[in-house]
Amino acid sequence: MSTTPVVVHTIAEIRGHVASARRTGHVAVVPTMGALHDGHLALVDRALEVAETVVVTIFVNPLQFGANEDLDRYPRTLEADVEKLAAKGVHLVFAPSVDAMYPDGPSQTRVTAGQVGGLYEGKTRPKHFDGMLTVVTKLFNIVTPDIAVFGQKDAQQVFLVRRMVKDLDLPIEIEVVETVRENEGLALSSRNVYLTPEERRAALALSVSLEAASSAADRGVDGVVRAAQAVFAEEPLVTLDYLVVVDPETFLPVDDGYRGPATVLVAARVGSTRLIDNDTIHLY
Ligand code: PAF
């Protein structure tokens, strides 16, 4: 269904629209930073299935970028994004400016992500998850959704958002949608636009390493890690940041003797672009 969404830029406007929409049923939010691709559109599809009104937020949140990260060059493509959302039949788009979200400068009050927030992505990107949880909390308070939809591609983000919702008793249901991949396996990401054709080919090392991990699921955690790491030894254009096997319940690393469901997290630098991916396997 194609219908032009109402695009608003202020908190007061989105609150007004959501207040009327709520009378006709549930409201789902899909928080994004824009530069929408098919992975985001899969989140939108899920939101449209579970709620009568779907709000997509588009906001490149400075609070979750480190000093040397890509805040300035992060792709901003609002017009094209709105066209894609119109084709899906999204009802509302909330695309605030930085001033609208942080009128008094970067917020002094932050949500902190705790122990897991300092691991994996959090090690390379200190404070990233505090900034992410802070803006997600603000977006939840502004949109007041019944349901929020996130992508499994950002597995650590999903874990931390779920944990925050539980810890802080937020009355919001979290829906998670599987990662969407290109034919050869590369997980869709807004940052893929930075890759040269050669880097794009090399970036397949991430998904190939996850396949290797899955094939080694009978060899214990150390065997899984060895099999997955071996893929990077063959790919000089890619520098592995971390490859770790975690318990999906706690998001803490598991020992070699662990058996059961496990999430394999991988992050690597391809040229100047940092990419992440993950898969859940069953160790037996
Ligand atoms: O996953 C993202 O795009 C961002 O981290 C989010 C959830 C929109 C918060 O800025």
Image (tube, grey):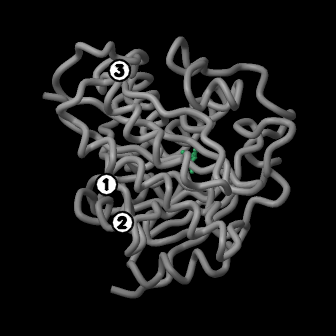
The secondary structure type at the circle numbered 3 is helix
Graded by Cα atoms within 10 Å as few (under 14), some (14 to 19) or many (20 or more), the crowding at tag 1 reads few
- Which mark is drawn over residue 166? 3
- Residue 25 is left or right of residue 41, and the answer is left
Distance in Å between CA atoms under marks 3 and 1 = 22 Å
Mark 1 touching mark 2, by CB under 8 A?
yes
- Residue 91 is left or right of residue 72, and the answer is left
Mark 3 touching mark 2, by CB under 8 A?
no
**Residue type for callout 2:** Ala
Graded by Cα atoms within 10 Å as few (under 14), some (14 to 19) or many (20 or more), the crowding at tag 2 reads some
Graded by Cα atoms within 10 Å as few (under 14), some (14 to 19) or many (20 or more), the crowding at tag 3 reads few
- Which mark is drawn over residue 42? 2
Q: Nearer the viewer, residue 278 or 131?
A: 278
- For the view shown, which residue lies furthest in the bottom direction? 2
Res 207 → quadrant: bottom left
- Residue pictured at 40% horizontal, 87% vertical: 2
The secondary structure type at the circle numbered 2 is helix
Q: Nearer the viewer, residue 32 or 227?
A: 227
**Residue type for callout 1:** Glu
x and y percent of residue 107 in the render? 77, 28
